[in-house]
Structure formats: C-alpha cells, structure tokens
Image (cartoon, coloured by chain):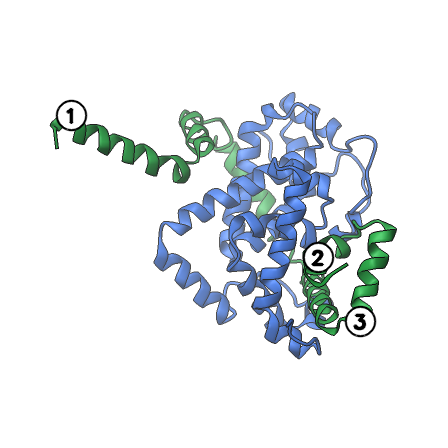
C-alpha cells in the first residue's frame, strides 16, 4: 500500500473496515513510514478526545416544562407546520438562488432589456 | 389533564454511556408499548418517553448548538415537535431513531435561524471561548478528569465544522450510535456517513493540533 492510499484509507482503518489482507498492508506501510504513523496517532487521539468529552445531563426541570407546555396546548399540530415542513423539505438555500436568477432573466426578457 | 405523571411505566436498566451501546441491537423496540399508549392519548406514557430520552436529546443539541440555554430551548422544542408529529411514527424504524431524527432536524433548523444573525453567532462563540453558558450542574469526576478548558476548546472546534460533518460525527463518535442508525437518522447512505465522519475527524484533528500536542501527540505532517 503506498503513501496516498494509506492516507485515504485511514478512516476505514480506524473504523475497523479493512479486511485482514488490507490491514496487513496498511500496518506494513506504517512500520516504515513515520509520517503516516504520526498522522494516524493524531487522528486516533482526536477520536479519544471526543470520547472523553463530559456528558451533561438535561436540566432537572426539562420534563415538567415540556409537559406543562403540552397541557397548555403547545403540543398540538399547528396550521403552519405543513408549509414549514414543505419549506424545509425544499431546502431554500439550494433552490432559491437559481429560481431567483430564472425569475430575473424572465423579467428582463419580458421588459425587453 | 393530570400532571401527576412521570413514573417509569416499563422498567429499564439505566442507560450506560452511549458509546457502549454501539452494536447492542435489541430484537424488540423497548419503547413500542409506551408509544402505543401515548398514541392512545396517555400523556403519562409520553412523559416517560421524554424522561427516557431527555439526556440523549439534550446532549446532542448541546453538541450541535454549543450553548446550554439554546440546547434546553431546543430540547423542549424537540419534545413538542415529537408530540405534534408523533403520529408519523409507524414503527418501521426504532423509536430512538425517530427521536434522534426529530432532535437533529430541530438542531439544524435552529442553527439555520442562528446563522441568519451573524452577531448572534459571534456572541455565542465569545461566550463559549470565555467558558460561559456551559451546562449547569455539579462538576463530575469525568469532567474533572478531562479538564473544563479542554472540553471548551473541543466544543469550540466542533462549532467550526459545517453541519453536514458535525452531525454525523456527534452522533457516531460522541453519542455512540452505530453507523446504521446514524444513516437512518440522517437519511444518508452508510458509505456517505462513514466518509463524512472521516472528513470531520480530519478537520477536527487539524483544529485541535495544540490540544493534541498538549497530550503528547505530535502534529500531523
């Protein structure tokens, strides 16, 4: 396994997704390449740091507040949930710019600019 | 409607740290009985589900939003959304997956809203950098062991990742969901999830280089 290939497969290696033969080739490269070994150690330590993050619990009053809001009627479907869900579904950030460009072009053609 | 609810209806062992759950697949969804009772109008059953998922939902939102107060607001909104749209849960995925999906959507919508106000984001980053607006509560041994400062820097680094990398990383590396569940929560192919997690780790590794050096790990070449 060569240098770029090892860099590309580092994620699979850490995730345990390489088969035995590939893993052996990967390990053989690491034995002779300090740069890749260093990269892998840094990547593994990054994952360890994430695993060691403290896990905060929810505030103790959260459940009571949720139940109180439901009892106040906030947990019922709202009339705008439909349009909002649609709006989120169409992903406006992706579709609005081309739609706006098309609208401007059409307007320019209509007014004869 | 009665408020005298909250007893655990179905007995369940305390949830271990999430990363230990990876790979532990139960044959039967343990939430289905409660879900059926909730769908039949039993608010106590819903409250039990909220108790069961509140910590997992809060943690995910805290990692995504970076602020305890935003995470709490979003957690309330998540459970209200769950109550509003719970009828859409048909049992074709695990209920936990459905809950994570609602929480993830709530987080993304909230970040979109926050993103429209640049000043708000900058203020949030400033509060994080100075250690404000972290979750309340006693400092546990786990947090003491890691060190508050490091935890803050890791969160600040996480905050710089784009949502499409941050969310799978948080679900997999911090919340400990298996690939298949992350894939279901996000509606992405498993290969895409793996690739995004790897890209997120690489980006985070570069951002955390000083942290890693402090831990005795040399910087990548």
Q: Is the same chain shared between marks 2 and 3?
A: yes
Q: Is residue A60 visible?
A: no
Chain B, colour shown: blue
User: Where on the picture, by quarter, is residue B82?
Assistant: top right
For marks 2 and 1 on the same chain, the one whose residue lies earlier in the sequence:
2
Tag 2 near tag 3, CB within 8 Å:
no
Which disc, if any, is residue A32? 3
In which chain is the residue bearing label 2? A
Q: Identify which residue is drawn at 58% across, 47% down.
A: A62
- Name the N-terminal-most of marks 1 and 3: 3
**Residue with the mark numbered 2:** A5
Reading the image, the residue beneath label 1 is: A110
Residue at disc 2, secondary structure: helix
Find residue A95 and report its horizontal and vertical position in percent: 39, 35
**Which numbered dot is residue B120?**
none
Q: Residue at x 70, y 25 (%)?
A: B92
Q: Residue furthest front?
A: A2
Q: Is residue B100 left or right of residue A96?
A: right
């Amino acid at each position: 396994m060569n240098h770029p290939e090892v860099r590309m497969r580092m994620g699979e290696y850490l995730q345990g997704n390489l088969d035995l033969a590939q893993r052996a080739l990967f390990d053989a490269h690491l034995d002779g390449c300090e740069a890749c070994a260093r990269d892998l150690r840094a990547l593994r330590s990054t994952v360890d740091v994430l695993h060691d993050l403290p896990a905060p619990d929810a505030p103790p009053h959260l459940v009571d507040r949720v139940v109180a809001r439901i009892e106040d009627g906030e947990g019922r479907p709202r009339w705008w949930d439909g349009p909002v869900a649609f709006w989120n579904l169409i992903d406006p950030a992706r579709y609005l710019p081309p739609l706006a460009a098309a609208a401007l072009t059409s307007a320019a053609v209509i007014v004869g600019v | 409607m009665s408020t005298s609810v909250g007893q655990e209806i179905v007995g369940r062992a305390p949830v271990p740290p999430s990363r230990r759950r990876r790979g532990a697949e139960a044959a039967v969804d343990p939430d289905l009985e409660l879900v059926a009772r909730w769908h039949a109008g039993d608010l106590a059953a819903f409250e039990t589900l909220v108790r069961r998922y509140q910590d997992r939902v809060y943690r995910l939102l805290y990692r995504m939003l970076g602020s305890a107060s935003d995470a709490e607001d979003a957690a309330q909104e998540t459970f209200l959304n769950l109550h509003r749209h719970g009828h859409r849960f048909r049992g074709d995925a695990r209920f936990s997956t459905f809950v994570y999906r609602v929480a993830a959507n709530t987080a993304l919508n909230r970040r979109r809203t926050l993103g429209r106000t640049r000043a708000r984001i900058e203020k949030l980053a400033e509060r994080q950098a100075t250690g404000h607006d972290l979750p309340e509560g006693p400092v546990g041994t786990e947090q003491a062991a890691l060190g508050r400062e490091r935890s803050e820097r890791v969160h600040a680094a996480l905050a710089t990742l784009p949502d499409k990398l941050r969310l799978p990383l948080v679900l997999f590396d911090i919340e400990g969901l298996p690939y298949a569940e992350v894939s279901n929560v996000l509606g992405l192919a498993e290969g895409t999830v793996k690739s995004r997690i790897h890209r997120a780790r690489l980006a985070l590794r570069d951002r955390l280089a000083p942290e890693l050096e402090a831990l005795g790990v040399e910087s990548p070449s």
